[in-house]
Amino acid sequence: MAIEKIMVIGAGQMGTGIAQVCAQAGYLCVIHDITVEQVERGISSIEKNLLRQVSKGKLSEQEKATIVNRISASTNLEDSVECQLIIEAAVENMEVKKSIFRQLSELTKEGTILATNTSSLPITELASVTSCPEKVIGMHFMNPVPVMRLVEIIRGLATSVETYEAIKEITLKLGKVPVEVNDFPGFISNRILMPMINEAIFALYEGVATKEAIDEIMKLGMNHPMGPLTLADFIGLDTCLYIMETLHDGFGDDKYRPCPLLRKYVNAGWLGKKTGKGFYLYE
Ligand code: NAI
């Protein structure tokens, strides 16, 4: 099935980034979220991003308008019937994702590919609630999507070769680099990244150093573009906690135990940049 129209589910920081790159690559794109306000906020953040590219001379006003015109809003999952590819980027919670995939399995036309941008959850388990597990695949973009080139592609146990090939081709069309991995908790990216972030939070929790010192050491000492606590704020502390829980449950090994300080911040609603407060304060 030729892919012309894509639905992106979840108009948060990842969903809006994914919708933007899809529209920029020429695809029609429907952004779906629970409320009209969330979808509108998502679309206006795309417009702001594109405006920044216009002011830098990377995009003309006309090109910006064309890209924005390719994007439409939805709060009704039934709109997925018009799309050949669905990329789900709702919260990192298995029950929420299963409920979405169950509905998509009923609503979409035969042949529609159901991709998820999950950071860590098993693709095979998610696919099991659908009637088309061969069409379910992990398509894990990095944050911020318009800037980062990697897409980690995760094949579930039943994912077909055709589905994998179609997603690989689209990833290349989006100007990204696909890298294939197998379906294990956290895949490769977060299996390696998230324990480092969790360890940085433990170091803060145990008073080994200040947050600024921890970030400065990892930036200057390891040549990372930003420190792990800043990065955690950018990812979202709720997402970090979900990922650590997935690793902990999935491997049953205490080396993945989420730091109590991470849990405390999430319980306080300090989720990082998206809520204005995490390890640092944001405007
Ligand atoms: P976010 O919190 O910014 O956005 C999540 C959005 O999903 C919200 O707008 C929320 O209203 C919406 N949502 C929740 N339940 C929904 C439902 N039932 N139907 C439709 N929309 C629903 O989260 P973010 O950071 O965009 O993450 C989304 C997904 O992308 C998660 O699975 C996360 O693990 C993954 N991811 C996140 C990265 C990051 O750096 N934040 C990087 C790569 C993947």
Image: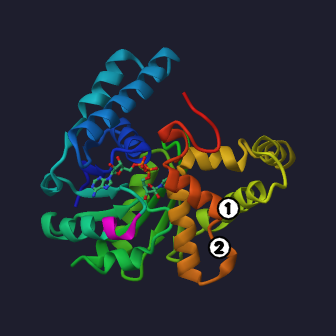
| SS for dot 2 | helix
Q: Of helix, strand and loop, which mostly describes the magenta segment?
A: helix
Q: CA distance from mark 1 to mark 2?
A: 8 Å
The image shows residue 224, relative to residue 111, as above or below, that is above
Residue picked out by circle 1: 198
Q: Amino acid at mark 1?
A: Asn
Asked if residue 51 lies left or right of residue 129, the reply is right
Asked whether disc 1 touches disc 2, contact meaning CB atoms under 8 Å apart, the reply is yes
Identity of the residue drawn at 41% across and 82% down: 157
Quadrant (top left/top right/bottom left/bottom right) for the C terminus: top right
Asked if residue 107 lies left or right of residue 93, the reply is left
Residue 219 location (% of width, % of height):
79, 43
| SS for dot 1 | helix
Residue picked out by circle 2: 256
The image shows residue 42, relative to residue 149, as above or below, that is above
Quadrant (top left/top right/bottom left/bottom right) for the N terminus: bottom left
Q: Which span is picked out in magenta?
A: 93-97
The image shows residue 108, relative to residue 223, as above or below, that is below
The image shows residue 51, relative to residue 239, as above or below, that is above
Give the mark count.
Answer: 2
Q: Nearer the viewer, residue 204 or 137?
A: 204
Mark earlier in primary sequence (1, 2): 1
Identity of the residue drawn at 38% across and 62% down: 116
Figure colour scheme: rainbow
Residue 12 location (% of width, % of height):
39, 45
Q: Nearer the viewer, residue 73 or 151?
A: 73
Q: Is residue 26 magenta?
A: no
Q: Amino acid at mark 2?
A: Tyr
Residue 204 location (% of width, % of height):
76, 54
Is residue 278 in view from this perspective? yes
Q: Quadrant of residue 19?
A: top left
Is residue 177 in view from this perspective? no
